[in-house]
Image (cartoon, rainbow, N blue to C red):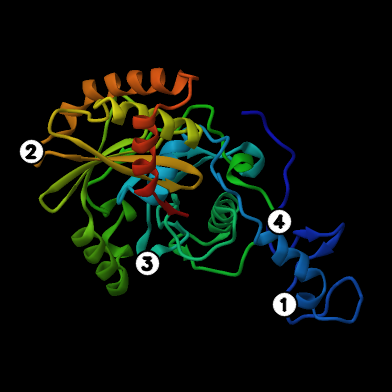
Amino acid sequence: MGKKQRRTGSAATTVIDGDIPVVGGREDCPCGSGKRYKACHGRAARIEAMKVAVRPFEGLAGECDWVALREIVPAATAVVPVQEEFGGGTVTVASILPMAWPALHRADGTVLLGLQTGGGSGDASRDLAAALLKARELEAGNPVAESDLPGPGPRLQDVLDLSGGFNVTVHEGFEFWFAQDNELTPEVRESLEQANGAAVSTKRLTSVEAAYWVQMGARRHLRWVLPDDETQVLDGIARLHAAGESALLPETKYVGSFRACGLIVPVWDLADDTEPEELEKPIVAFSERLREAMARTEPLTADERRARAGVVSRQVTLR
């Protein structure tokens, strides 16, 4: 990925509308209008912050896994290099951090970036980039707490060097949060225990990208994040469903899909004893069937239209 011109994102130097610095909302606007910032150039910052990026991770290597870690995977990490113009080194991207912190500068100097956070603007990529850069400025051992919406600034696509891909490691628990026991304050230890107690067993398949086996109680599922156009995917699944070919294994059942960060995520119910390795060959075969079905250009048949209506009716959206 080629480097882009750096756009500074700190509160001290970010600019709106030319060279107007960002200041506190109740302070006088630096433009000299006599108005408070929030009623003057701060309004432009708010408008910018509320712009929605439908696919915030588009353009990143491993977009589907980014979406999976943000929406469906309890405990996972990936170590990613940072562009030299933003300080170099690496950042550990994590599904979630203690108390949903946006980022954490650990005592050992490692910076962790949490994807599952509350609040934020309409562009998760910009929010996460702002959290990452802020964490690097903190003294080691401190988290980035939730803050006001970031002003215009770099996105992950600008800050990270993903030329080496996005290699995910799935964890059974959240011990990866801390390198040393002395980092565990009582509040954080409680958060760790609660997270470990709520985590569901998850495995990433190796034969395709971004497919995750999940066990919730006695039930097992497969969730697969796809990068393709949603209409084409739904048409393809409808064709397979009408032909009785939408299952991965004889005892599996396609149950619908949901949207997350602009991508579609089909879901299958699995037999209670289905292990992840049993799905490797079947999902490759299904992927080939789906590609063939998506490539067909003739109109859907009546049976396929009915199947598509059922497929669509079971969709939900995760933002």
Q: Quadrant of residue 257?
A: top left
Whether residue 16 sits left or right of residue 91 in the image: it is: right
Q: Secondary structure at mark 4?
A: loop
Residue 237 visible (yes or no):
no
- Dot 1 amino acid type: Gly
- The residue drawn where x is 26% and y is 63% is 192
- The residue drawn where x is 58% and y is 44% is 156
- The residue drawn where x is 58% and y is 58% is 134
- Dot 2 amino acid type: Asp
- Dot 3 amino acid type: Met
Q: Nearer the viewer, mark 3 or mark 2?
A: 2
Whether 202 is drawn above or below 124: the answer is above
Local packing at callout 2 (Cα closer than 10 Å; few below 14, some 14-19, many 20+) is: few
Q: Which residue is mark 1?
A: 25
The mark that comes first in sequence, 4 or 3, is 3
Q: CA distance from mark 3 to mark 2?
A: 34 Å
Q: Nearer the viewer, mark 2 or mark 1?
A: 2
Q: Secondary structure at mark 2?
A: loop
Whether 302 is drawn above or below 130: the answer is above
Q: Which residue is mark 3?
A: 99
Q: Quadrant of residue 25?
A: bottom right
* Mark 4 and mark 3 residues within 8 Å of each other at the beta carbon: no
- The residue drawn where x is 48% and y is 25% is 299
The mark that comes first in sequence, 4 or 1, is 1
Residue 311 visible (yes or no):
yes
Which labelled disc corresponds to residue 273?
Answer: 2
- Dot 4 amino acid type: Pro
